[in-house]
């Protein structure tokens, strides 16, 4: 296996390298083909337990339905029998009383017994007759007797028809559940009971549901009313109005639809309500439950569904929803109660069939687009929000999927959720499901805000009627767009002003001047210093370029200020702390890495090939202590590890922005990602060294080479984090290729002084190569001591600085991670 060639300084151990290469390649092929089996086995076990619990809950519910029906029939017959017996004994009593008046003093033993029986039954009859009047007396009550047969029929384990302290008992009972089977049985049992209650209370309104709700439920989901007065958003630097003079409110328990033509500011309006509008100057007021408070202070109980489906594609539907529930629900809820919330959402959104399916990515197809959209909505529903804001949740859905989603949102509204959503071209059946309608005209002006069922009446008052077989919302949007001319004298540009005049709101001066209303006495002119007529300005290329740069700088400053200034939390919801969230993030990232094992296997295979090639091409020279081979090593390992590390943060920016805006911990997210990447930090040096060492055969030991490579990979991984967070994916990849090459060339320049020396000290390849060379040089002894000292002195190395070089590499990695975290927090988008 090994041999010593004539004139060689070291033993030839290439054969060991070939065998090791073959073994590791075979292991990577196994991982490549079997990576999904670990998680799939666990998912099958959970699915089996869940299906058994669901089947048991359905059977129990059916049995209780049958038993309840039988009891109702028995009670009905018992009531009839009781009434019949009461009438019979009453007639006998009257007959005996008449006989008593006829024959005074003639008393028989039978009459005495009959009188006692008459007293008891008559009292029972009186009790029966008084039940209808709301009074209860003691006596023979057959209904009570039937209830004694099954005293727990209406208790916590039966049909819970009494809303009160029993919900507190249910919560206490849920906290005692430990095993997965018990938790699933509890969750599905409660869902079956809720289905029965929904059938009984299907005609209840929000006020009726609120009267039935317990104090604990109201505390978990407090109602939020959002009112806005003269809300105006102006783009900084350009003085362009995104929204103007928007006044109204959205209320809990109601579904509000925001509609309007393209460019009317629908998404901007939702962003302003959610406290996410940056780069704009805001005027007017937003009131939360009548108080002038920031909406962002309630972010823990506000759900925001973006227009894009920002869902983790390498997680299943259930895993996506479960992670959101664990991190965003109250920390005081037990696991059983969180599972119950999860199962409710999956049931209401119709995701049972795909709950164990991967959502899918561009490379690997998963669930359908409509199901992905529902998962996007479900991520916010599982956190039990008080205010749910949705940006076009029905876009791309067919009519049946849209109807299913709207029904789920209607059920949320019945529980007191304030729902506001942007809708694009809804069908008439969907339109009738909305409680309120907000019609926006171009320029962010309100054309109508009020009950959806009264919108046709309002426009009919303006002389605008809806033609037959035309969907009303489509007709109104076409008019606001200017595509359809209204069948009246009202111009589409006048509709926002008509709404202002209809409600007595002040009309801005520039709108009055455009429509020739300067002399109108009832216009209620408003002059805030911003609404003057816009003059014609002369634009130039340089001026426009400067204006764009100024706006971009202002937008960045607003993002940084928005991310640094933390508002007070007024939601009264205590979510899991940073350590618990770190554990949740760690589990999620671990699952994602297991499902990406094939990608990791390819990375390792490329490292193996690089180690074998570079180890063969770059032979150790005693004069340079193997510096040439280590130069190639630093470049190759840095480049390959940096490109691979970009995936940790570059591909999940949108997911992080969404999760951070909802109140999840940024530090827990960053540490979990970095912790999982430490696996690659430990393993990749071994993979590369397993080939390079046996093909290159340096004098230093395997351990010394591994320690240097470990510190090098830790350093370049941190630098890759900075590139991934600060740049877009394309430029980040270019930088990760350019930096190792340029910095290594700078580190290999002849030793100079001044600026060049300082610049060289800031290059991490300088310290990595010095550590490699020193590890090799330590193995030279005897006559090589003089040569070793001369060579090290020429390069500017100190023989005892090996540990210092390692510490500097670790310091580079630590500093770059701190910088990456700060960039991640400062430059995130809310």
Image (cartoon, rainbow, N blue to C red):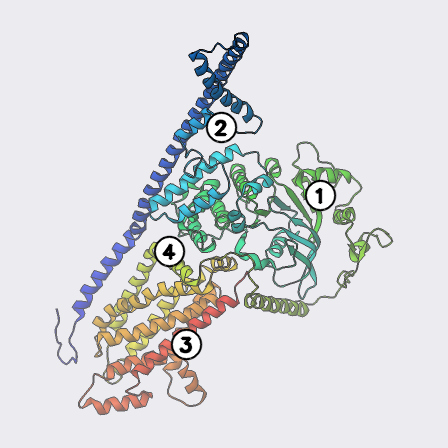
User: How many residues crowd around disc 2 within 10 Å: few (fewer than 14), some, or many (20 or more)?
Assistant: few
Residue 801's image quarter? Answer: bottom left
Q: CA distance from mark 4 to mark 2?
A: 67 Å
| Residue at the spot of label 3 | 742
Disc number placed over residue 459 in the picture, else none: none
Residue 645's image quarter? Answer: bottom left
In the image, 384 versus 160, the foreground residue is 160
Please give the name of the residue rendered at 43% of the width and 22% of the height, measured from the top-left corner: 74
Q: CA distance from mark 2 to mark 3?
A: 97 Å
In the image, 75 versus 598, the foreground residue is 75
Question: CB atoms at circles 2 and 3 under 8 Å apart?
Answer: no
Q: CA distance from mark 3 to mark 1?
A: 60 Å
| Residue at the spot of label 1 | 479
Camera-nearest label, 4 or 1: 4
Q: CA distance from mark 4 to mark 1?
A: 49 Å
| Residue found at the far top of this picture | 102
| Residue found at the far front of this picture | 105
Please give the name of the residue rendered at 28% of the width and 86% of the height, measured from the top-left corner: 800
| Residue at the spot of label 4 | 592
| Residue at the spot of label 2 | 138
Q: Residue 496: percent from the left, percent from the top?
A: 74, 49
Q: Residue 37: percent from the left, percent from the top?
A: 29, 50
User: How many residues crowd around disc 4 within 10 Å: few (fewer than 14), some, or many (20 or more)?
Assistant: some
Left of 447 or right of it: where is 153? Answer: left
Q: CA distance from mark 1 to mark 2?
A: 72 Å
Q: Secondary structure at mark 1?
A: helix
Residue 573, placed above or below residue 670? above
Camera-nearest label, 4 or 2: 2
User: How many residues crowd around disc 3 within 10 Å: few (fewer than 14), some, or many (20 or more)?
Assistant: few
Marks 4 and 1, the one that precedes in the sequence: 1
Camera-nearest label, 1 or 2: 2
């Amino acid at each position: 296996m090994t041999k010593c060639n004539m004139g060689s300084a070291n033993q030839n151990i290439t054969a060991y390298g070939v065998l090791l290469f073959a073994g590791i390649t075979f292991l990577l092929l196994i991982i490549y083909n079997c990576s999904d089996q670990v998680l799939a086995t666990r998912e099958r076990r959970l699915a089996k337990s869940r299906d058994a619990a669901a089947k048991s809950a359905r059977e129990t519910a059916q049995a209780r339905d049958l038993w309840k029906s039988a009891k109702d029939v028995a009670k009905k017959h018992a009531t009839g029998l009781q009434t019949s017996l009461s009438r019979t004994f009453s007639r006998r009593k009257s007959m005996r009383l008449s006989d008593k008046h006829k024959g005074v003093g003639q008393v028989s033993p039978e009459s005495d017994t009959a009188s006692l029986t008459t007293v008891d039954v008559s009292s029972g009859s009186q009790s029966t007759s008084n039940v209808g009047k709301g009074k209860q007396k003691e006596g023979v009550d057959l209904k009570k007797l039937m209830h004694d047969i099954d005293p727990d029929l209406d208790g916590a384990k039966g049909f819970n028809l009494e809303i009160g302290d029993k919900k507190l008992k249910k919560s206490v009972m849920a906290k005692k559940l430990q095993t997965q089977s018990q938790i699933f049985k509890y969750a599905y049992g409660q869902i079956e009971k809720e289905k029965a209650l929904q059938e009984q209370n299907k005609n209840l309104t929000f006020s009726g549901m609120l009267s039935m709700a317990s104090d604990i439920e109201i505390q978990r989901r407090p109602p939020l009313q959002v009112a806005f007065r003269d809300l105006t958003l102006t783009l900084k630097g350009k003085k362009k109005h995104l929204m103007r003079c928007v006044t109204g409110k959205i209320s809990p328990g109601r579904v509000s639809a925001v509609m309007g033509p393209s460019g009317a500011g629908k998404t901007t309006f939702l962003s302003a309500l959610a406290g996410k509008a940056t780069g704009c100057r805001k005027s007017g007021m937003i009131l939360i439950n009548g108080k002038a408070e920031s909406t962002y202070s309630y972010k823990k109980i506000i759900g925001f569904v973006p227009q894009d489906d920002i869902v983790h594609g390498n997680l299943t539907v259930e895993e996506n929803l479960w992670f959101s529930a664990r991190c965003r629900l109250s920390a005081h809820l037990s696991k059983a109660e969180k599972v119950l919330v999860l199962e409710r959402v999956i049931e209401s959104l119709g995701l049972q069939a795909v709950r164990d399916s991967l959502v899918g990515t561009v490379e690997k197809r998963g669930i359908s687009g409509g199901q992905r959209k529902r998962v996007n909505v479900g991520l916010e529903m599982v956190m039990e929000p008080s205010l749910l804001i949705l940006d076009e949740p029905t876009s791309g859905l067919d009519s049946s999927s849209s109807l299913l989603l709207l029904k789920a949102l209607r059920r949320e509204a019945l529980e007191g959720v304030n729902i506001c959503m942007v809708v694009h071209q809804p069908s008439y059946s969907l339109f009738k499901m909305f409680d309120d309608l907000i019609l926006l005209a171009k320029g962010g002006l309100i054309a109508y805000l009020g009950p959806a069922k009264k919108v046709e009446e309002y426009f009919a008052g303006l002389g605008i009627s809806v033609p037959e077989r035309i969907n009303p919302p489509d007709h109104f949007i076409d008019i606001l767009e200017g595509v359809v001319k209204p069948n009246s004298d009202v111009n589409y540009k006048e509709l926002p002003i008509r709404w202002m005049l209809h409600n007595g709101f002040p009309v801005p001066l520039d709108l009055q001047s455009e429509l020739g209303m300067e002399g109108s006495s009832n216009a209620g002119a408003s002059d805030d210093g911003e609404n003057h007529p816009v003059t014609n300005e002369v634009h130039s290329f340089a001026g426009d370029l400067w204006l764009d740069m100024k706006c971009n700088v202002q937008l960045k400053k607003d993002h940084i200020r928005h991310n640094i200034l933390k508002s007070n939390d007024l939601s009264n919801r205590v979510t899991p702390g940073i350590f618990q969230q770190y554990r949740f993030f760690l589990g999620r990232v671990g699952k994602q890495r297991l499902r990406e094992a094939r990608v990791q296997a390819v990375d390792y295979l490329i490292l193996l090939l690089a180690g074998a090639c570079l180890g063969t091409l770059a032979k150790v020279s005693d004069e340079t202590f193997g510096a040439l081979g280590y130069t190639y090593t630093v470049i190759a390992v840095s480049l390959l590890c940096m490109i691979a590390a970009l995936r940790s943060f570059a591909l999940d920016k949108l997911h992080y922005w969404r999760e951070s805006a909802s109140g999840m911990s940024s530090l827990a997210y960053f540490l979990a990602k970095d912790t999982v990447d430490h696996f690659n930090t430990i393993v990749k040096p071994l993979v590369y060294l397993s080939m390079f060492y046996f093909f290159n055969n340096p004098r230093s030991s395997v351990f010394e080479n591994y320690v240097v490579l470990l510190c090098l990979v830790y350093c370049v991984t941190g630098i890759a984090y900075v590139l991934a967070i600060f740049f877009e994916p394309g430029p980040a990849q270019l930088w990760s290729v350019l930096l190792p090459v340029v910095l290594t060339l700078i580190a290999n320049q002849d030793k100079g002084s001044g600026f060049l020396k300082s610049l060289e000290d800031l290059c991490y390849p300088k310290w990595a190569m010095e550590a490699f060379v020193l590890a090799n040089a330590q193995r030279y002894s005897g006559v090589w001591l003089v040569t070793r000292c001369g060579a090290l002195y020429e390069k500017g190395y100190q023989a005892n600085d090996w540990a210092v070089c390692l510490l500097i590499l670790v310091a580079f990695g630590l500093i770059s991670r701190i910088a990456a975290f700060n960039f991640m927090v400062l430059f995130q988008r809310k």
